[in-house]
Amino acid sequence: MSDRAAVVVALAVAVGAWWAAPVPRPIGVVAVAAALVARRPALLAVGGLLLAAGLAHAAWAGLEPPPPASVTARAVTLVTDPEVDGGEVTAVIRLDGRRLEAQADDGPDATIFAEALAGERPVLSGRIVPVTGRPDLAVRHVAGRLVVDVIGPVGAADPVSTVANHLRRAVARGAQPLGEDATALLTGILFGDDRAQPPATTGHSRRRRPTTSEPRG
């Protein structure tokens, strides 16, 4: 493939990602495979455009603001590690196939929630509300917020996440004699977990989250 053809293919993929049309992904896969077998750059550009459009559409699907609803004692899956910020504990969760940002006031129960790790399944009760003015959530495929009222026990994760979390906790316990700052630095280097690191170490301060579009009551 010539340099010019490579540029055309790259531009076609970029256009497809911007287009984000509901193109069936198998069509794009077949077109790309046929282009690679036949060594046809033009067909590869078309296939790349269609495949990128289908993947982009799937990535943005499900981001419509969810209708307000009550959640009672539901086990959710943590997509991210919980973070403590300004007296609140927040984490991205998965509930009924949709990603939400769970937000709980800091307290004894919230401490248990904050100590959980990605993949684990805490039991939460609360209210689902829409979120506005948070484009950073949209790019993370988060469609709304669960304002948590009651936090229950934290259930085990899937086998792979259970093994990973066991190793993470073992490393953190082994590093405790080094002190809090050194432990936070080590977990940040090894696992990308900078929650316990001071802003001077991370080089930034976490942005205060705006309130939801509904009062917390």
Image (cartoon, rainbow, N blue to C red):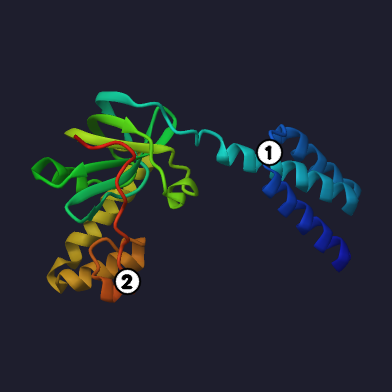
Residue 79 image point, x, y percent:
37, 43
Q: Residues within 10 Å of mark 1 (few under 14, many from 20)?
A: many
Picture residue at 27% right of the left edge, 26% below the top = 74
Q: Do we see residue 105 in this rendering?
A: yes
Q: Nearer the viewer, residue 1 or 175?
A: 1
Q: Secondary structure at mark 2?
A: helix
Picture residue at 38% right of the left edge, 41% below the top = 131
Q: Secondary structure at mark 1?
A: helix
**Is 115 located above or below residue 27 in the figure?**
below
Question: What residue sits right under mark 1 in the picture?
Answer: 54
Picture residue at 35% right of the left edge, 48% below the top = 80
Horizontal placement of 181 versus 168: left or right? Answer: left
Q: Amino acid at mark 2?
A: Thr
**Is 84 located above or below residue 61 in the figure?**
below
Q: In the rendered view of the protein, which quadrant contains the C terminus?
A: top left
Question: What residue sits right under mark 2 in the picture?
Answer: 202
Q: Amino acid at mark 1?
A: Gly
Q: In the rendered view of the protein, which quadrant contains the N terminus?
A: bottom right
Q: Do we see residue 155 in this rendering?
A: no
Residue 194 image point, x, y percent:
30, 64
Q: Nearer the viewer, residue 92 or 77?
A: 92
Q: Residues within 10 Å of mark 2 (few under 14, many from 20)?
A: some
Residue 153 image point, x, y percent:
17, 33
Q: How many marks do you count on the picture?
A: 2
Q: Nearer the viewer, residue 211 or 105?
A: 211
